[in-house]
Amino acid sequence: MPKPATKTRQSAVRGSRTGRPIMALLDLLGRRWTLRIAWELRDGPLTSRALRTACDDASPTVMQARLSELREAGFVELLSGDGYHLTPLGRELMESFLPLHHFAERWSRRLAG
């Protein structure tokens, strides 16, 4: 008799029928303001207001929705009195973007010059 299928944590992801982890991550990071919020937190905690200012005064409703998603994903925490900050997992994610950041800086200089 075959074993019953085991449920996985994979869930539906926009644009993907598989729900693979990379697709779920790209879906989350591709949402408006999500990556920007995480990027702005890379240097340390920010209050909700300071984070909105750093994100060009993004809508408070959208900011809170994205912060909730980032918290649920384990990338961001809310510290009492300090505001939002990256978790160790969030810092690891932002570190993985540093090579892309350096490339973008070089690319930008090349286009300008």
Image (cartoon, rainbow, N blue to C red):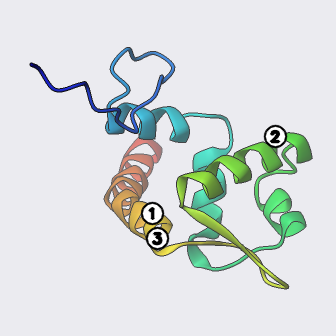
* Of residues 1 and 98, the one drawn nearer to the viewer in this rendering: 1
Q: Earlier in the sequence, mark 2 or mark 1?
A: 2
Q: In the displayed structure, does residue 59 sit left or right of residue 7?
A: right
Q: CA distance from mark 2 to mark 1?
A: 21 Å
Q: Which mark is residue 94?
A: 1
Sooner in the amino-acid sequence: mark 2 or mark 3: 2
The secondary structure type at the circle numbered 1 is helix
Mark 1 near mark 3, Cβ–Cβ under 8 Å?
yes
Q: Crowdedness of circle 2 by 10 Å Cα count: few (<14), some, many (20+)?
A: few
Which structural element holds mark 3? helix
Q: How many marks?
A: 3
95 on left or right of 64: left
Q: Which residue occupies 59% across, 59% down?
A: 38
Q: Amino acid at mark 1?
A: Met
Query: Disc 2 on helix, strand or loop?
Result: helix
Residue 75: image location, x then y, percent: 54, 61
Residue that label 2 marks: 62
- To which residue does mark 3 refer? 91
